Each structure stands twice: as structure tokens, then as C-alpha cells.
Image (cartoon, rainbow, N blue to C red):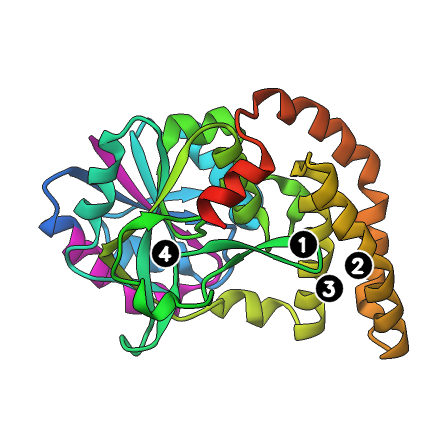
Amino acid sequence: MKVNIAILNYNGRVLLEECLPSILEAVKASKHNVFVTVLDNCSTDGSIDFLRQAFPGIKVYVARKNKVYCSYNEFFKNCDDDIVVILNSDIKVDKNFLDPLVENFKDPDVFFVSSRMYFFDGVTYQGDKSKASVRLGIISADTRFKGYETLIMDKSFTFSTGNGAFDRKKFLELGGFDELYLPGRYEDVDFCFRGWKSGFKGIYEPASVIYHKGYASFKVAFSDKEIQKTVFRNSLLFMWKNITDKKILFEMHFWLLPRLVLFMLTFRFYFLKGFLEALSKLPEILRIKKNITKNFKRTDRQVLNIVG
């Protein structure tokens, strides 16, 4: 199999200097035909010049426009690899992280595979074994579900991943990450959920270990309030776009009004702004929904029964 490790970068020169050596060590340890590419989102910090000088063996792909995670759509269309491992620039990897991921793609139904993820300290577990949780009618990916501590060494299905290995052909078949969610959050949950509903699988592979600094670039670009607003807005977009189960949608709308009232009473008006932004996109969402539901092979309940 031809494998490409694609590292998303925006003004992450310092992070690349810190993290890339571990990735190159993993390439040497792999039995597969592996390339490393930095997908640069129009950086202005000299990242590209630094890479060409310090890591001349690494390929650089410069996105036409900074579309955050959605820049991967352009990259996947223009590469010819079988498997693409997508990583943020703030991720280090274990020397033997790669081959356990790739082995899972012997199953033709596997769409994505996630790793066992720790913070940089190598001790504190962060994810990426996730379940679909439903709170106040909203479906989200939960890596801190009850009993997760005893299960992190168990290989299993997983709901979603934002840093993992993807089957390139299935990625393109599903249309990639949806720009509807820009500047980010929930686009990975949306994409993986569509994969599950289309009949594919997501696997958690604990034999593959990575280390994450934790949203380093996102926290620099956006305030906490902006992030909370975006997560709320995108959670509504996700539900309206993907959910076809009437009972689940009823529960979501049942809780929506009291949530909005609570936001007003507690002067968190940025959540109301998020709601209005989501509402303005509703006609577009309904057009998208009409097209994507044609390819769904599983119901919402079936997916939740598997990974919920």
C-alpha cells in the first residue's frame, strides 16, 4: 500500500521543528511505502522555507486558500495514495505508530482508523477512542465516556477521529470535509458519521500511539467565546444536515428553546449569535441533506447502537 502522512500546517514552524523528527523516525520503522507531506495553509511565518532547508526530503503542498481542515479535500484530490494519515502540526508519534493503523485497511469496509492519543506529557490520555453521546438532543463525539479508562487498550469501533488514517477513495466518495463548518469544529464528526451511515467502519487501534499538544493553533486564532459559539452553531448544522430520525430531531428541538432562554438569562449572547448563523444556513443545509441521504445505508439508530 502507498501511504502518505499529511501534516496540516498554518504558521506552525516551531511545532514542525519539534514534531517532524518523530514522524520521520516512524517512516523509517514502517514496512510500507510511506511519504511525508506538509499541507501548508498559506503560512506567513517562513514555514515553507524552513521545511526546505531543515527537512529537504519532505514534500510540501501549498493549499490555494486556507480552508483549515477542508484544505485536505484539495490535497486528497491531487494525490494518488491508497491511505492518507492526517495529522495536525502539533502531534508527535510513537516510532511504531503507522503499521498498526494500515493493517486495518485489509478489511475493505474500513474507512478510517484512529490512534491511542496522549498529551505531550506521554501520561495523560486524551482520546481518540470515541463514542457517540446524546446530550440535550445533540449528538457529539465523547472520549470521556463512562468507563473509558478501562477500555483504552481494547481495539474496537470508534465514532470519529480528527487525526487518523483514511482510505483515500472512500474519502473522495463521501465528498471530504464540509466547508459548512468553517472555520472548524464538528467537521470531523460530520464526515465520520456520514461514513458510518454510508455503510463503512471506523476502528480504534490502541497499538498505534500519538502525542498531541491540544488545539495549539486554534486557541491562538480564536477566543474561548468564539470557540464555544462555533461549536454550538456547528452542532445544530450537524443535526439538521445528517439526522433523519424524527424522534432524535424532536428531542433536539425540545431542548433548544430552553437552552436559548438560559443563554439570554446568563448574558451569553454569543450563543444566540451562533444560533442565528446556523438558522441562516438552513436552506443550504436542506439542499445538501436531500443529496447525501440517498447514499445512507444505516439509520441514525443503527449507528448509535454500534458506536453509542
Three-letter code for the amino acid on which mark 3 is drawn: Lys
The 10 Å Cα crowd at callout 4, few under 14, some 14 to 19, many 20 or more, is few
Per the image, label 3 sits on a secondary structure element best described as: helix
Instruction: Name the residue carrying label 3.
Output: 229
Which percent across, then down, holds residue 184? 60, 54
Per the image, label 1 sits on a secondary structure element best described as: strand
Q: Quadrant of the N terminus?
A: top left
**Residue 7 colored in magenta in the image:** yes
Upstream in sequence: badge 2 or badge 4: 4
The circle on residue 138 is 1
Upstream in sequence: badge 1 or badge 2: 1
Three-letter code for the amino acid on which mark 2 is drawn: Trp
> Which residue shows up at 84% across the image and 47% down it?
279
Instruction: Name the residue carrying label 4.
Output: 49
Q: Compare residues 129 and 11 and report the one nearer the observer.
A: 129
The circle on residue 4 is none
Instruction: Judge whether 123 appears above or below 236 on screen.
Output: below
Instruction: Judge whether 104 appears above or below 137 on screen.
Output: above
The circle on residue 255 is 2
Inter-mark Cα distance, 1 to 2: 9 Å
Q: Badges 1 and 2: C-beta atoms under 8 Å apart?
A: yes
Q: Badges 1 and 4: C-beta atoms under 8 Å apart?
A: no
Of badges 2 and 4, the one in the foreground is 2
Q: Is residue 66 visible?
A: no
> Which residue shows up at 24% across the image and 38% down it?
104
Q: Badges 3 and 4: C-beta atoms under 8 Å apart?
A: no
The segment highlighted magenta reads 1-26
Three-letter code for the amino acid on which mark 1 is drawn: Ile
Inter-mark Cα distance, 3 to 4: 36 Å
Per the image, label 4 sits on a secondary structure element best described as: helix
Q: Is residue 144 visible?
A: yes
